Amino acid sequence: MIFRRILAISLFFLGACTAESSPAPGVERPSEAGKGEVRAKIHLVDGAARVQAANGYAFNARPGIPLLAGDKVMPGAKGFVVLRLQNDYLVRIDSGVELEVSDIVLLGAPKAKLSLAAQLDRMLTRKEKRKGERIAGWHARLTGAETVPTSSKKKRSLRRKKAVHKHRALQEVRSMEAEEVAVPMKATKREDVKRGEAREKVERKLQKDVAEKGVKPPAAPPGGGVPSATGAEEVTADADTDGAPLVPSRPVFKWRTRVGDKTAEKNEPLPVLADRMRRDPLVLESLNKELAMLGVELETVEIMVELANHRIKRVLLGGGLLTPETIKARYVNKKMPGGPADGWVIFEVALP
């Protein structure tokens, strides 16, 4: 009886971490979706997910199905899809995000250094691991699997390690915040609130002037504006038509918002908190560490911020990259005025 329980628990990671590369028996790519070079295979599916081929043909996502470069993976409203690339990297695509295989950052990366089990441990939450039985593909392709010891002692050790990892992420956020402003914590919070309120007040006044008086920032000087480190154009305002001084505006960027199926391109200053994120030393350092661990070099990284009632619900990275825990700990649940109340704010961060 005890042996059966241990065996059942062992299957939790067994099916997900298999090293077998061939599709599961009976799982083939639909002929209508076209043929070509296989760039990835569906590894896990949580919820109802679809794949749209380059020719427009759409089919249900099932573990083991080969994917081509032009295929677009579309997870359901709730759930996610995990792909396994030819270089043994696992890529997670979350709900609300549609990703074409050719846009995956790690597609051309060297062979993965981390084991499949280690990668899954990083990308799945504890709740998702507990419901492994209900995730499609969990028990598929058992031959040659990497197994994870599942004794009670080992499970306690894994829980402790994860708790320590989360604690270190929070400690890193706090230490970097303390280094940025060396003042007492209570004073820092008060100053942050005051600065945030002041910025919002200035923005509201500027928006009101634009709406009522038609006030606009002056055109950029001959030769264009002063380029910032990220390539954005610095626009400064001197005075309005009545001679009254205008408040200097923040850099103008190309970014976009998405609400439902509607995407709006923007060419204006980012929301205040998003502008802070793109310059935050913690964000830049965390992204560089993540890319260095993966052996990938990038000049920019796309950040996708999901908002619910003007508060940050999720922070995701483009191209299938995992968001470092330090960034989540610092920004999730923070208020972000200036964007849609419920939707996405998407922008790029230039890496130093």
Image (tube, rainbow, N blue to C red):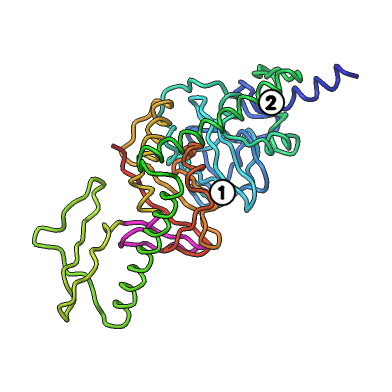
> How many numbered marks does the figure carry?
2
Quarter in which the C terminus is drawn: top left
Q: Is residue 256 magenta?
A: yes
Using the image as rendered, state which of residue 241 and residue 292 is in the foreground.
241
At label 1, the amino acid type is: Met
Near mark 1 (Cα within 10 A), the count class, few <14, some 14-19 or many ≥20, is many
User: In the shown orientation, is residue 334 left or right of residue 64?
Assistant: left
Q: Callout 2 environment at 10 Å: few (<14), some (14 to 19), or many (20+)?
A: many
Label 2 secondary element: helix
Q: Residue at label 1?
A: 74
Q: Is residue 315 magenta?
A: no
| Residue 218, horizontal then vertical, whole percent | 17, 69
**Residue 314 seen by the camera:** yes
Residue 281 x, y percent position in the rendering: 35, 40
Which one is nearer the viewer's eye here, 54 or 178? 178
User: What residue is pinned by disc 2?
Assistant: 13
Above or below — where is 234 with respect to 351? below
Q: Is residue 256 left or right of residue 47?
A: left
Mark 1 to mark 2 CA distance (whole Å)? 24 Å
Which of disc 2 and disc 1 is earlier in sequence?
2
Q: Amino acid at mark 2?
A: Phe
Residue in view at x 24 percent, y 77 percent? 215
Residue at x-position 40% and y-position 63%: 197
The magenta-colored residue range is: 254-273
Q: Quadrant for residue 119, please give it.
A: top right
